[in-house]
Amino acid sequence: MANQTVADITDEAQEVGSLDEIELAEIKTKSVSGAATYFARTILLNIIGLAASVVLSWYLSPEDFGIYGYVIQFIGILTFFSDIGLAASLIQKKETPSLTDYRTTFTVQQILSWLIFLATLAIAKSDLVTGQAVWILLALGISFPLASLKTISAIQLERKLDFSKLVMPQLVEQVVFNGLLIALAFKGFGVLSYAYAILARAIVGSVAMFIIKPWSVGFELNLNVLKKLINFGGKFQINDLLARIKDSLFQILLFRFMTPAEYGFMSWGKTWSMYPYNLTVNNVMAITFPTFSRLQHNPSALKKAIEKSLFFITLAIFPMIVGMCLFITPLTEVVPKFAKWQPAIISFVLFSLSIALSAVSTPLTNTLNAIGQINTTLKLMIMWTVLTWVLTPLFLVWFGFNGVALAGLAIGLTSFLPAFYVKKIVPIDFFGQIWRQAFAATTMAIVGGLGLRIWSNSVSMMLAGMFITMSVYIISFVIIGRSKLFAELTSVIKNQAMLSKIEKLLCLKN
């Protein structure tokens, strides 16, 4: 490598292609390696998170879950005001952001984050939050200024598609948060455990991010830069505002019409149903938004990237959701400490099914945002917000607290609309990417459902059932989809094999 001449590297460049093709290959390679890094990181984090949920479900009451779920909704609303879309604008921006861009964003975020903290103080003094919930709210409030300290570093890493470094602070945060949460819950701190864990997470996350990606911190407020960033970010933020109204604000109002225990059952079901989504969709989205933004002027490459994301997301999430729906009942029957959560099973299953629908719609909505079609996603969000506010109260009256999850599933049936809008711009093969996974998951559900009584006899039988049903999914998919899987994996391996050449060529470019 040290003795290689420029001529040798130039010859390699001709083998790989033009500099534009090299850049495209770089994007593909970094995206694939980033996805692998994120997935590996998320497996570890979800194991930690699952362990924390098991311990908390063991020690905390439904009322405790209800209190935390209620308080977190206030933060969901305040989060809207913490950014005004500037981070998304910098990631989506075609040109490389300047130091003025970064410092202007940092300055605005610092101002907004401290205003949010003052807002949490005002809420804490009102009768909206009482008791130990006040300390959780204050811990979440002070975490905003702390979290804003790491935003610019994260944006720079995302623009470079350097996801391997981006995941490290997140790993540190979650290990500290869940580890402290478990320890304090075990010692009997109850719902107050969340306050200490939230504060510790904010501190260590900011420190870790700055160590990994330091930048020239400074305060600056360039109005011309701010105006340009808000031009895209404003629409993005309106979209986010509707999401907050649809979810967080609505959840606060729901608390007024449900007992703490009912709200706790609903929150528990929703929290547990989100694990497959967090493992797959959330992490893939963190990669696809900057990646799709870079590919928006290459329709062919963008089409392949969208299809790959749909294929691998559904390959992983469909069996997870089916497995969780099948074995939630046996879990509450063979583990006595979990019997108190049996009233939440229906909500859990309904939330899980709606998550399956979101798994195919959210990446496509994210695609529309990444390629600048924010007006389209705005229309979709308006529709989903209206449906949430209309259907959920009706379902709550008709079906009790389970009606919240049922309404979510009904609204989720519209999740295929983003595919329609994406196909108008990029001719993706939507159905071709998911039908094999759907068929294998359906076969898994049938076999698992037939043996449900057997799986509920003991822990050993439950574990055996998990192994059997997962084997059914794998075998079913291999029978009908092995050629598709082989083609996708071969493509990934080829991209990785080009990495060493790409790195040399990028050095030549620079």
Image: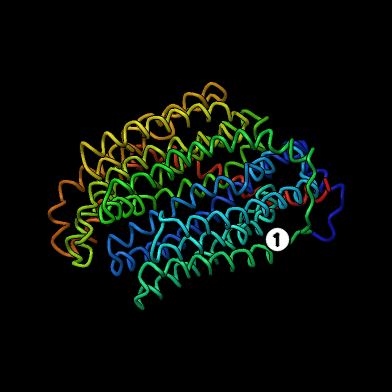
How far across and how far down the image is residue 385, in percent?
43, 33
Q: Is residue 484 left or right of residue 80?
A: left
Is 156 left, or right, of 322 in this rendering? Answer: right
- In depth, the one of 163 and 143 nearer the eye is 143
Which residue type carries mark 1?
Lys
Image quarter for residue 368?
Answer: top right
Residue occupying the far bottom of the picture: 187
Judging by the rendered image, the residue that carries numbered circle 1 is 213
Question: Residue sitting at 51 percent across and 62 percent down?
Answer: 138
Q: Nearer the viewer, residue 238 or 328?
A: 238
**Label 1: which secondary element:** loop
Q: Residue at x 33, y 59 (%)?
A: 65
* Placement of 441 over or under 197, stated as above or below: above
The answer to whether residue 376 is seen in the rendering is yes
Q: Position of residue 9 (x, y in %)?
A: 81, 48
Q: Relative to the observer, which residue lies in front, 426 or 141?
A: 141
Q: Note whether residue 474 is visible.
A: no
> Could you tell me which quadrant the N terminus lies in?
bottom right
Counting from the top left corner in percent of width and height, residue 74 is at 46, 51
Locate residue 361, reporting x and y percent.
44, 35
